[in-house]
Amino acid sequence: MTSNISIGSPAPSINVQHWLRGDPLSNFQLGKIYILDFFSTTCGYRGPVLSHLAKVQEEFSDMGVELIGVAANEEAETANEALAQVDKWVTKWLPNTKIRIGFDHSGEMAKHWLLASLSFHLPQAFIVGRDGSIAFIGDPDMPVLQTLAEYKGEQG
């Protein structure tokens, strides 16, 4: 049985099967802020939004912010076809990306993050705070910036 997660809960582990961009990551580093953006290549506007979030990562890099895109719920005949589909999409929308992009073909990340938070639609974002707990769950657009601005205010 998957545990429920909400704001304040410890962040579940990172368990993607393939890293398409960036170095593999298996654990969150305390003291850093992570934005996990779950997306699907079938969502037409995700490319520009992920590109914007990559710029947000650059803007807040001095605070230790790192964006991780996680392709989830890809529809294809096989895992290899889905992986190729995600890679082609990332190459198109994020050709020079410095963000990590993972592919969750087993559904483990979706199970422990999306289903556990009762998030049934993509895109969905999570912010993992410096203490390793969930600080935000929701639409990855404006609230992400608001939450990061709050962290910046805490730094003084």
Image (cartoon, helix red, strand yellow):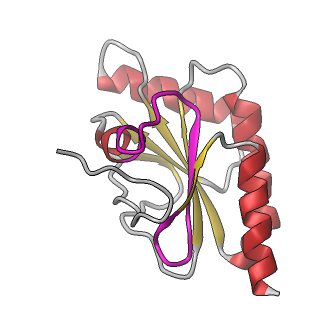
Q: Is residue 148 above or below residue 38?
A: below
Q: Is residue 99 left or right of residue 134?
A: right
Residue lying furthest top: 77
Q: Is residue 70 left or right of residue 32?
A: left
Q: Residue at left 82%, top 65%? A: 59
Q: Is residue 63 above or below residue 120?
A: below
Residue lying furthest bottom: 156
Q: Quadrant of residue 77?
A: top left
Measuring from the top left, give residue 140's x and y in whole percent: 67, 43
Q: Is residue 118 above or below residue 13?
A: above
Q: Residue at left 32%, top 47%? A: 112
Magenta highlight on residue 7: no
Magenta highlight on residue 128: yes
Q: Is residue 151 left or right of residue 21?
A: right
Measuring from the top left, give residue 79's x and y in whole percent: 31, 25
Q: Is residue 27 above or below residue 35?
A: below
Which stretch is magenta? Answer: 113-134
Kindly tell me whether residue 95 is visible in this rendering: no
Q: Residue at left 56%, top 24%? A: 41
For the N terminus, which image quadrant?
top left
Q: Quadrant of residue 9?
A: bottom left
Measuring from the top left, give residue 4's x and y in whole percent: 33, 49
For the C terminus, which image quadrant?
bottom right
Measuring from the top left, give residue 14's x and y in whole percent: 37, 57
In front here: 47 or 146?
A: 146
Q: Quadrant of residue 45?
A: top right
Kindly tell me whether residue 1 is visible in this rendering: yes
In front here: 4 or 47?
A: 4
